[in-house]
Image (tube, rainbow, N blue to C red):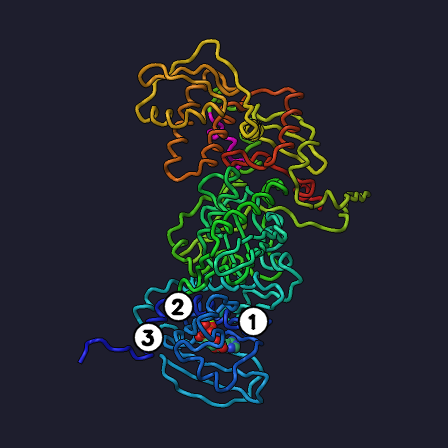
């Protein structure tokens, strides 16, 4: 007799459970996905002890026929697929027929379900994969599944569960994000009798984002609207006609100043499925390239809709990964859609304001919901906890009336005034259970439609609504009135909508950066000839880089010539670079060229070179500017494509809105 045996279903289910059911949140995910597939519009999720003791999900969807209620627990039993052809175009969240049998094999499960097509429903009880009860029952239409004592029969698995709070946080994050994907439905999450989240039917995604995160977060976000991109597929052997596939992208992304230390605030839905996808993650990073410092990430909530044949969802048992048929199209169109929208909206960073709460959430939820999607839990476990920013505007202004002694030319990042920017840096974090949760990012006040009145003894002042809350746009930079500088480094300006502080060095850097790139593209880079050629000694490594990028150097405004062994003579340089900066700039560019080998695209290398030139040519901090120069700087900044961040990703201008000023003076 052979040695190979076919495993009994009970064992096979437990093996499948190893992949499908990692933790309580994976159970919630599978059950909620089933409820969504069943077309429900009211979902109630109750948990106890972070889902270890109980997870109960009720829906008002299609329910199951009595006979199906039993069949649903068979391995590979599904109503969502018929044959292998269907695998190519899956429109439901489930399709593997694995979740129910897997969950039932590692818990005590009670299913109560009725289809409106039948008078009575079914009650099924299973423990550790063994059927204990099956009976006909009088039930309302819809389905309720209660999962108790998860992993009670697999102690090894149970040991790996994190604290109740962490598990609960994963569940809260998951429910929140599914609620964002279905604004029309009602979601209620209850933990140990406390309501953590309750959102009712919303008209659209914007309203749901408001319900879940509150108006302050909403103001930090840029609405993508709906962007459609068409992919034209030329005729092939199997298909005579050219095909056009439309990809639709909706969602919200944060202003570049909202900078997170990891990817945990990025949520990607493809055809309604919450997934983790490298292609789209990369596209998001590429969209923020030069707008955000390298190791920072934005908040993003993206919904990509496309023909189901364009995406293979059968990649991983937990269905959290997909494979796109036309990867580079998805990548490039996502990147461009995001970048164009960021450039178009030019959001201005605000000073920090105390965060408020959203209508649909409790305080506990606020903390919990910011945890990442359960499947990506490893990430939070390895996370470093960022220090909460200290100081803010107050500290910056208070420090000293004497300007700090900064040697001319020193990089501005060493300035004590840095505290000013800290408020727009990584969001403060709060530790919660074993994870750590980013708190709300810097926030701006809610828009209000009515003119707001302020009670000052005997006087009512009415401010027009347009001044009172529309998130500031950097387009207004051109209309500002510069009032002077702080520490000869930051321009203070008054505008129709409040007070602005502009970092003169990074502002000029942005102006020069875009100018260099534009001139380069037009083949007319402004350059200056040196009176005396400058001779520079290179290392062997630099010599190799130099030889490799000699053409690029010329295009960008350098005139150089080899001058003996490992020596070059610089005869001309991009305009605006002082002779003292030239050698350092060239070395910096050679270093960037080296990065090229480490996987940067040629385009990125070019942008980095332009950023270097811009930085060296820009007005330094600790430089006095007269009125004309300040006016010029603001007008030129307003005319750039991306006045919100310098090419290295730091913010350029901070905005203190009229509303914030009034609030601080207790006038509202
Ligand atoms: P899959 O979702 O991959 O089909 P599952 O094991 O999750 O596999 O579910 C098996 C089947 O049980 C589903 O195909 C569906 O017909 C039925 N089912 C599960 N949950 C529900 C629900 N909440 N409402 C109606 N039918 C359900
Ligand atoms: Mg399922």
- Looking at the image, can residue 96 be seen? yes
Mark 3 crowdedness (10 Å alpha carbons): few <14, some 14-19, many ≥20: some
Q: Is residue 348 above or below residue 613?
A: below
Q: Which residue is mark 1?
A: 43
Using the numbered discs, state the Cα–Cα distance from disc 3 to disc 2 in whole angstroms: 12 Å
Q: Secondary structure at mark 1?
A: strand
Label located before the other in sequence (2 or 1): 2
Q: In terms of secondary structure, where does tag 2 sit? A: helix
Looking at the rendered image, the quarter that the N terminus falls into is bottom left
Indicate the quadrant where residue 196 lies.
bottom right
Numbered tag placed on residue 111 in the rendering: none
- Helix, strand or loop: magenta stretch: helix
Identified at 50% across, 86% down, the residue is: 66
Task: Report x, y in % for residue 101.
Answer: 40, 77
Question: What's the magenta region?
Answer: 411-421
Disc 2 versus disc 1: distance between alpha carbons? 22 Å
State if disc 2 and disc 3 touch (CB < 8 Å). no
Residue, disc 2: 20
Dots 3, 1 in contact, CB < 8 A? no
């Amino acid at each position: 007799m052979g040695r190979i045996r076919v495993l009994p279903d009970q064992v096979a289910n437990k093996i499948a459970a190893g992949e499908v059911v990692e933790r309580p949140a994976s159970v919630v995910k599978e059950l909620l996905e089933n409820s969504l597939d069943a077309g429900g519009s009211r979902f109630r999720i109750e948990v106890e002890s972070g889902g270890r003791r109980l997870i109960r999900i009720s829906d008002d969807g299609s329910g199951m026929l009595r006979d199906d209620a039993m069949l649903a627990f068979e391995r590979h039993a599904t109503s969502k697929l018929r044959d292998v052809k269907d695998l190519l175009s899956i429109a439901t969240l489930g399709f593997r027929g694995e979740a129910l049998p897997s969950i039932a094999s590692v818990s005590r499960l009670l299913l109560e379900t009725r289809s409106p097509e039948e008078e009575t429903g079914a009650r099924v009880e299973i423990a550790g994969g063994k059927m204990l009860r099956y009976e006909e029952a009088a039930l309302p239409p819809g389905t309720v599944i209660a999962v108790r004592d998860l992993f009670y029969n697999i102690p090894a698995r149970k040991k790996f569960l994190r604290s109740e709070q962490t598990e609960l946080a994963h569940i809260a994050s998951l429910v929140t994000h599914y609620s964002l994907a279905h604004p029309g439905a009602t979601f209620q999450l209850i933990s140990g009798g406390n309501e953590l989240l309750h959102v009712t039917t919303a008209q659209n995604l914007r309203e749901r984002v408001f319900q879940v995160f509150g108006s302050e977060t909403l103001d930090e976000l840029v609405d993508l609207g709906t962007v459609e991109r068409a992919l034209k597929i030329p005729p092939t052997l199997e298909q005579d006609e050219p095909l056009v596939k439309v990809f639709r992208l909706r969602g919200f992304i944060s202003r570049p100043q909202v900078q997170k230390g990891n990817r945990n605030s990025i949520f990607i839905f493809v055809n309604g499925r919450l997934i983790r996808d490298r292609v789209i993650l990369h596209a998001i990073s590429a969209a923020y390239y030069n707008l955000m410092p390298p190791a920072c990430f934005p908040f993003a909530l993206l919904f990509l809709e496309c023909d189901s044949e364009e995406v293979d969802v059968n990649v991983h048992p937990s269905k959290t990964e997909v494979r796109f048929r036309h990867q580079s199209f998805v990548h490039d169109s996502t990147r461009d859609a995001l970048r164009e929208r960021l450039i178009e909206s030019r959001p201005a960073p605000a000073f920090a304001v105390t965060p408020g709460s959203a209508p649909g959430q409790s305080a506990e939820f606020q903390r919990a919901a910011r945890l990442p999607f359960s499947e990506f839990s490893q990430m939070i476990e390895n996370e470093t906890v960022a220090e909460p920013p200290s100081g803010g505007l107050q500290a910056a202004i208070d420090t000293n009336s004497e300007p700090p002694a900064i040697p001319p030319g020193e990089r501005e990042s060493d300035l004590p005034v840095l505290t000013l920017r800290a408020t727009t840096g990584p969001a403060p974090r709060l530790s919660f259970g074993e994870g750590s949760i980013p708190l709300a990012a810097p926030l701006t006040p809610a828009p209000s439609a009515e003119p707001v009145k302020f009670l000052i003894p005997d006087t009512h002042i009415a401010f027009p609504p347009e001044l009172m809350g529309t998130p500031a746009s950097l387009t207004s930079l051109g209309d500002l009135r510069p009032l002077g500088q702080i520490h000869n480094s930051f321009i203070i300006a008054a505008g129709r909508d409040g007070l602005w502080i502009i970092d003169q060095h990074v502002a000029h850097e942005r102006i020069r950066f875009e100018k260099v790139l534009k001139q380069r593209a037009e083949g007319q880079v402004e350059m200056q000839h040196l009176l005396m050629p400058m001779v520079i000694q290179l290392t062997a490594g630099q010599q190799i880089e130099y030889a490799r990028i000699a053409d690029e150097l010329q295009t960008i405004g350098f005139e150089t010539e080899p001058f003996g062994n490992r020596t070059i003579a610089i005869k001309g340089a991009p305009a605006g670079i002082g002779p003292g900066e030239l050698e350092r700039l060239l070395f910096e560019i050679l270093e960037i060229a080296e990065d090229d080998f480490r996987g940067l695209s040629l385009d990125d290398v070019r942008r980095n070179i332009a950023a270097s030139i811009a930085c060296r040519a820009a007005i330094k901090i600790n430089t006095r500017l007269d009125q004309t120069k300040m006016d010029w700087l603001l007008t030129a900044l307003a005319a750039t494509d991306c006045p919100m961040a310098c090419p290295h990703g730091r913010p350029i201008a901070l905005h203190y809105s009229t509303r914030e000023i009034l609030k601080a003076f207790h006038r509202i």
